[in-house]
Image (cartoon, helix red, strand yellow):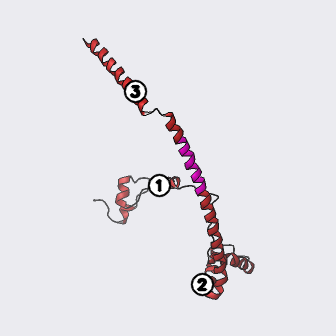
Amino acid sequence: MKGAKGKAAARVPKEVLNPADDRRVGKRKAAAGKVDDRKVKREKKAKKDPNKPKRPPSAFFVFLEEFRKTFKKENPNVTAVSAVGKAAGEKWKSLSPVEKAPYESKAGKLKAEYGKQMNAYNKKQESDDGDEVSDRSKSEVNDEDDEPSREEEHKLEKEQDEEEGGEEEEEDEDDD
């Protein structure tokens, strides 16, 4: 009897399958490689600066803060975050532009304040970077003072060439 075709052939316990059988059955290998990729990606990301200002909430999130309080009072038994979010989304969609205006204006003020904070933060970052550059330039200048001049380098090269030439003559004498 030839090998079974169809679904019956695919019903082999996972422990029995070897990598070649996995390909035939259509199963994928475990995502072990993906886990390694994720770790690498995490390591590549730059760490966040705790001093950097947080982005301001949008008009919807300003509305959501207020809506949460009223929703909790009206529905004390509902503890699911998703239920609050869905109810808030529906309410936000049903609001007219006039009703949304106070939330949008508050979000605009928060955005302007964030812009000021970011400008101050960026200026501080630039000044910190500028100090590092100037420190580096000072150390580079000091390093250059420690290095020999061109004339001294030329003398050293001549001395090394003479020493090498003397060693070669000694080796030639040993060969004879």
Q: Which residue is mark 1?
A: 37
* Residue type highlighted by circle 3: Lys
Q: What is the residue that sits farthest to the left in this orientation? A: 176
Q: Main secondary structure of the magenta part?
A: helix
* Residue type highlighted by circle 2: Lys
Q: Which residue is mark 3?
A: 155
For the residue pair 124 and 141, the one nearer the viewer reads as 141
- The answer for how far apart the CA atoms under marks 3 and 2 are is 83 Å
Is residue 128 shown in magenta?
A: yes
Figure disc tally: 3
For label 3, the crowd category at 10 Å Cα-Cα, with few meaning under 14, some 14 to 19 and many 20 or more, is few
In the figure, is residue 133 to the left or right of 26? right
Q: Earlier in the sequence, mark 3 or mark 1?
A: 1
Q: Earlier in the sequence, mark 1 or mark 2?
A: 1
For the residue pair 67 and 63, the one nearer the viewer reads as 63
Q: Earlier in the sequence, mark 3 or mark 2?
A: 2
x%, y% of residue 9?
36, 61
Height in image: 127 above or below 103? above
x%, y% of residue 151?
41, 31
* Residue type highlighted by circle 1: Asp
For label 2, the crowd category at 10 Å Cα-Cα, with few meaning under 14, some 14 to 19 and many 20 or more, is few
Q: Which residue does the image show at 37% across and 61% down from the upper left?
A: 26
Observer-side mark, 3 or 2, equals 3
In the figure, is residue 30 to the left or right of 138? left
Q: Secondary structure at mark 3?
A: helix
The stretch of residues the image draws in magenta is: 126-139
For residue 93, which numbered disc appears in the image? 2
- The answer for how far apart the CA atoms under marks 3 and 1 are is 54 Å
Height in image: 5 above or below 155? below
Q: Which residue does the image show at 38% across and 53% down from the upper left?
A: 19
Contact between marks 3 and 2 (CB within 8 A): the answer is: no
